[in-house]
Image (cartoon, coloured by chain):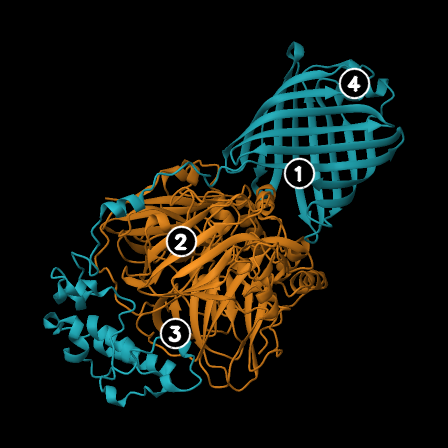
Amino acid sequence: MMRARKSMQWIALAAALSLPPVAASAQHAGHGQPVTSSSTADPQEEPATAPQPPDAGTDHSQMDHGQHDRPQVDHSQMDHSQHDRPQVDHSQMDHSQHDRPQVDHSQMDHSRMETLDSPREPIPSVTDADRLAAFPPLKDYHKHGTSLNSFWLMDQLEGANTDEGREIAWEGIGWVGSDINRLWLRTKGHALDESLQRARVEVMYGRAIHPWWDVVVGVRRDFGDFGGGGTPRNWAAFGVQGLAPYKFEVSATGYVGEGGKTAAIVEAEYEMLFTNRLIASWGVEANWFGQSDPEEVIGSGLSTVEAGVRLRYEITRQFAPYIGFEREWSFGETSDLRGLSSHSRTDNRWVVGLRFWF
Amino acid sequence: MRSRPSGTSAAEQMLLSRRQFVQGLAAGGAVLGLGLWPKQSWALRSPGQLEVLSGTQFDLSVGETLVNYTGKTRPAITVNGSVPAPILRWKEGTRVQLRVRNDLPPGSIHGDSTSIHWHGILLPANMDGVPGLSFDGINRGESYLYEFDVRQAGTYWYHSHSGFQEQGGMYGPLIIDPIEPPPFSYDRDYVVFLSDWTDMDPARLFARLKKLSEYDNYYQRTVGDFFRDVRRDGLSATLSDRTAWGRMRMTPTDLSDVNAHTYTYLMNGTTSLGNWTGLFRSGEKIRLRFINGSAMTYFDVRIPGLKMTVVEVDGQYVHPLTVDEIRIATAETFDVIVEPAGQDAFTIFAQDSARTGHVSGTLAVREGLRAPVPAVDPRPLLTMADMGHGGHGAHSGLAVPSADPHAGHGAVPAPDPHAGHGAPAAQGAHAGHGSGSMQTHPASETGNPLVDMQTMTPEPRLSDPGIGLRGNGRTVATYADLKSLFEDPDGREPGRTVELHLTGHMERFAWSFDGIKFADAAPLRLNYGERMRIVLVNDTMMSHPIHLHGVWSDLEDEQGNFHLRKHTVDMPPGTKRSYRVRADALGRWAYHCHLFFHMESGMFREVRIEE
């Protein structure tokens, strides 16, 4: 069976390449083919003495060795010194075993059916020089997978003409760190006619605890004179952020401020691809406060919800102008406070902006 | 001999024209020496034909050379001033000495230290050229003398193992002439060295992948695709497909991390425009030594009008296999014999596996000829079955090739790929390969933030031509078809089995074995002299070419028999493959994914062979 199958292979080989099947077949003549008789053969002499498969072109006189002498053959590529006689192809084998008595030749032909206890190619014995070469004393070196990286995204940098004046707004996020541990920077704010209205900056340590979620802990500082007070407020911040199923980018953060004040912000964003460059980004942000802060025009409970869509065109991945529309609602006490001051309870604005990262 | 039309939209046409601009602006090659190495003139005189250095003693100088492949002049890191580095031609049975000198200029973007690793070569560990494992690297102004016995023959390659230098141009072909003539004949012999060039500083490219790994994926499905699929497949099938991918937070268009939007593909250091040409006379047999020396690219190679007979893979003879097309994983080599006749010119066409670009050259009866260049094939989509999430009969979906690359995905009934719909898959029957039950995973993957996916029913899939090659009307070489021309040179059954999982996180661009990056991993210890088996399971949606230094990786067939001797084993998504290792080389060896940036981000282990 094996012999028949192999003979097909040799025929295929010879047919495919029109070459004398000497080398290849002889190689196997030495190793695999004469299933029943090779236990007595000395492989070194097999080309001459061992039984040959009848199909493998054992009649060397009939082989066409002539092609090796054709003038167009590039002899520089080959060693022709052996071409004139039938030759075992030793090139793929370490025949050193053949001089070693421990090789069990009786098993050589049964590799497909039986396994060897000792390797067909013996394992070289090890010298002190080998040991020295194998384990040289080395300095510490760069370890793959320890790189520090960073990402700084200005997701929104936009202008709008509102009833109250010319508004500039931004929202950005960035990190520096490893795959697991990162220092996060998040910021958002807006200015009206060059006067900073309301801004927040958060610096947080974030740690990946799940393939898609990071926990973040840090501080937040608010600026601006939206309510006319202009006193910066500080918060301790903690939360989660990440990528929810269906690729919603989500973050939820709780805050504890001076005097036990509390607040929370939940954000979600989803990107819709019209093309791979024309991308709509839908976003929503909800603000909640535990206590009212009339000076800042903040009431307790759900305070504001912003929802918007921005349609950007990625000239490059890193630089995309956009247009968008955003609406802000105020609720409850916040809405009342806005009504008392000069601020509108709801706010619609068309925006034009840039998104970029580096 | 054009392949199927690729059906480009207007938007894609724009991209294509941009890409042609990138790919075709310059023939490439060294434009200007830095005064350190005078041999660029050679490259200019004979574009595309690589320099050959042969013998036993070699002096190699690592330096910076300005090159221009895109219209921009950039500093490549080179050996003796050329990209690729010169062909080194050794002779089996000799002892070679290679003195490698670091002539990098101060302030080079390629760093201060360098190294050369001889890929696939059996040698003492301190000659292997991996800084931190083999030696300390070669600092600027210093030399290192590599010296070892050449104990094998075939087609190999060499490259830097330091920093980002391999991506920066430091790679070259290595040919070892056998003592005995090969079991095939040929009249001419050409190296066809494929690589991926970027004008970016490779370190910046890596940083970019960490910031936004999908940067180059301009093929994500759009709103328009959704409505097209609804019309074709129905609303519920489309929704369930989008749901499956949405829950995974992945995209089926994610076929490679870096593609032709960033890369210019090179053949023997020349762009398509440069048209590397190998000459032939009608009726001659040509040996083409294909080497994929790219950093991040799988190439699918064919020569329209010619059959290719594969005779050697990874430097080792295989039973001759006549095919139309080969997929060459990164770091693999394929030697083929072709017999061009009947035409004056044939195109050697190499497209990236993600179908974003190509490089072509020509076999011709004289310089200056070209044959038609086929269009790049349509882009395939990954399916849940591709990733071993197949449970419900999706294996048949895998086995039945689909000519329409989009035909498969709508039918994949996997609303939740992780839900455990565990129809037992028929797996390889031999010991160490699952018994047909769900794949188990190492504990280190559980709750690991850097493991974004686990395969459920992986299979060897040795007879799978691969994503994007199924049912394309061409005969494609598979691992199942390729068989070593010799019996198992060791012959022992493996004494033990070690299973390792290929893991990663696409979005964080973090890659590892078993969820543990190199920096945090203990070495994999082998006992000197043992024959053992490594089983790899791919828990990611990417293909990984896994390379073990120092010793062979003897791929097993699906029954667990010795099948194909390799130095680099391709692991497509959803596969579980095993190979035998004969631990006959003492020392500390690198074991890693040969996608350069996967290695760099942690998919790397030390294999320590000790007495």
Task: Using residue A302 as the reference point, say whether residue A106 is left or right of it.
Answer: left
As measured in the structure, the alpha-carbon distance from the residue carrying label 2 to the one carrying label 4 is 63 Å
The answer to whether dots 2 and 4 both sit on one chain is no
Taking the image as drawn, is residue B309 in sight? yes
Say what amino acid the circle numbered 2 marks: His
Few, some or many C-alpha atoms within 10 Å of disc 3 (few <14, some 14-19, many ≥20)?
many
For this rendering, which residue is in front, A85 or A39?
A85
Q: Are dots 4 and 1 in contact, CB under 8 Å?
A: no
Residue carrying label 3:
B321
Which residue has dot 1 on it?
A: A269
Cα gap from disc 1 to disc 3, whole angstroms = 53 Å
- SS for callout 2: strand
Tell me the CA gap for discs 4 and 1: 26 Å
Specify the quadrant that holds the C terminus of chain B.
top left
- Numbered tag placed on residue B547 in the rendering: 2
Q: Residue furthest top?
A: A259
Are discs 4 and 3 less than 8 Å apart at CB?
Answer: no
**In this rendering, do the residues under marks 1 and 3 share a single chain?**
no
